[in-house]
Image (spheres, rainbow, N blue to C red):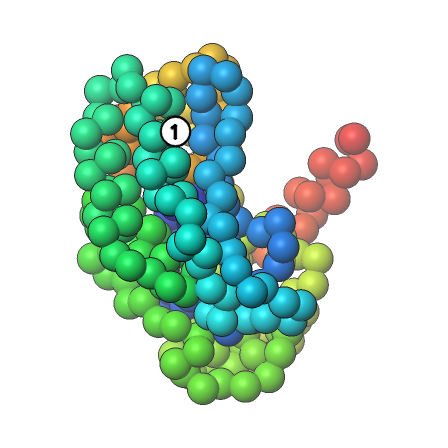
Amino acid sequence: MYFPWVGLLEQIRLSNIFIFYDDVQFSRGSFSNRVQVKTADGMRWLTVPLRDRHLGQLINEVQIDNRSNWRHKHRELLSQAYANTPYLDDMLMLVDRVFANDFKCLADLSKASILTLVDYFGLADNTSFQDSSMLHIQGHSSQRVIDLCLHFNAEMYLTGHGARHYLEHERFEAQGIDVAYIDYSLHCYPQEHGKFTPYVTALDLVANCGKEGASWIAGMPVSWREFIADQLNKEEIL
């Protein structure tokens, strides 16, 4: 993800090993190259332009289109959106730290934006970061994730909510691996521009709360059976 929302940081906080899944197919419309920002004029997108993109391309193959000055545009939008926040300078410092690098590959930019936020909030003291492309573990779908877990002798696999549509949970359990979903905290913190929403870049948390924002990064794991049952109950209510 590009300057991701707080939910991803909650997963990292709970992880001993966090794997950047960089050698899977890039999905148009994903958050690999874009994120929302809350402004006085409503929600706006920060989108990193891409070049020479083609169907089936892996995330670590996708190239950034640096022919336009998108960094300046992103920084200006952020400067304006958070002009009145108490930690504007902290937020812009993190942005400048990432933008100081001449990234060519989207995966490198996204990873740097994540790690910069992680470092700021002090979330990575007990976390090792790995790239799936460097582990040389083949396969696909649930089996590849299982093999990645086995490679690190993992006892639990923690994932986001989207995985419930395709993950084969029992196959993990057959290998002695518990599956858990992140129960996002979605805690309200002081935020500019109207009604609170958690679904924006974590730069929002930086600008509004500074390093104290770490206390709002508080999601917890929930077993997959409990999570699936809860999701089904919500669907029945709807």
> In the picture shown, does residue 104 fall above or below 117?
below
- Please name whichever residue, 178 or 118, is drawn nearer the observer in this view of the structure: 118
Does residue 67 appear in the picture of this structure?
yes
Residue 57: x and y in percent read 59, 70
Other-residue count near label 1 (Cα within 10 Å), few / some / many at <14 / 14–19 / ≥20: some
Residue 1: x and y in percent read 45, 52
Q: Secondary structure at mark 1?
A: helix
Q: Quadrant of the C terminus?
A: top right
- Please name whichever residue, 97 or 135, is drawn nearer the observer in this view of the structure: 97
Q: Name the residue that disc number 1 marks.
A: 77
- The residue depicted at 24 percent of the width and 35 percent of the height is 92
Give residue 132's quadrant in the image: bottom left
> In the picture shown, does residue 97 fall above or below 46?
below
- Please name whichever residue, 143 or 120, is drawn nearer the observer in this view of the structure: 120
Residue placed furthest toward the front: 67
Residue 20 is left or right of residue 54, and the answer is: left
Residue 53 is left or right of residue 86, and the answer is: right
> How many numbered discs, if any?
1
- The residue depicted at 34 percent of the width and 30 percent of the height is 76
Does residue 173 appear in the picture of this structure?
no
Residue 164 is left or right of residue 154, and the answer is: right
Q: What amino acid is labelled 1 in the image?
A: Leu
Residue 147 is left or right of residue 78, and the answer is: right
